[in-house]
Amino acid sequence: MGRDYEQLSEDYYDKIAARFDWSIDGLLSYPFKRLINHELHLQTGQRLLDVGCANGRLLALLNRQAEIQATGVDISAQMIALAKKRLPKGRFACASAEKLPFTDSQFDYVICSASFHHFPDPDRFLQEAKRCLKKDGRLIIAEVNIPILHDFYNRHVAAASEDGDVKAYRPSELSDLFQGHGFHIIKRRLIFQMQYYELSL
């Protein structure tokens, strides 16, 4: 029987939710949030969905740019509880990235910050993101980039991970995945251990 990655993620992030911002995971993920905040230029009233939103830190950061309609989902109920406190005007739900609890064509942006490597079925997530985006919407992916130790990481680190890591992706793998689902790569940036994509339908 295979590993239940979503259950691993739920258990792990429930456990560290209260101290997430100062945990190794929180500190390592913050540069991805800063990168997204730097790259996006938002307008008041735009509808954003952050998939794997954790405690809402990215949505709160983006909401300083413009008063957005912020929505977040996360597998961890403890993280969602904290997100609701951090951004009381936001909408938050405890849900799987592979079964988003929203109707079609709702969002101007669907964002995934340093969480894509947790998704057991990335194809299903991409289908769901595509379904939830407006026709002129954008999918934003910021993901880890491990060019030298990629194979070692997947064989030894991700395979033994307690936090639900599934695998790290090479830029070429992500590009193929995105294009295979009909997304066009509008922007791609590789910055140290980060890769950033802005995708259109």
Image (cartoon, rainbow, N blue to C red):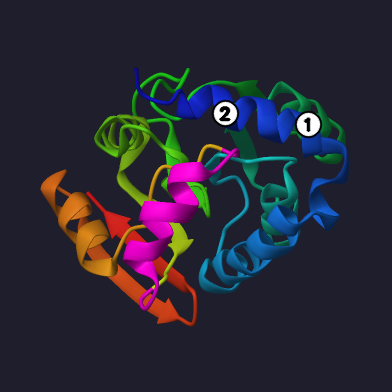
Residue 140 visible, this orientation = no
Q: Position of residue 60 (x, y in %)?
A: 75, 50
Residue at 47% from the left image edge and 81% from the top image edge: 191
The three-letter amino acid code for the residue at tag 2 is Leu
Residue 41 numbered tag: none
CA distance separating discs 2 and 1: 11 Å
What residue do we see at 55% from left, 22% from top?
A: 7
- Mark 2 vs 1, N-terminal side: 2
Image quarter for residue 129? Answer: top left
Residue pointed to by mark 2: 8
Residue 10: x %, y % from top left? 62, 26
Query: Which residue is nearer to you in this view: 10 or 104?
Result: 10
Name the residue carrying label 1. Answer: 15
The magenta span reads 147-163
Residue at 43% over, 44% down: 159
Q: Nearer the viewer, residue 126 or 132?
A: 126
Q: Is residue 119 left or right of residue 30?
A: left
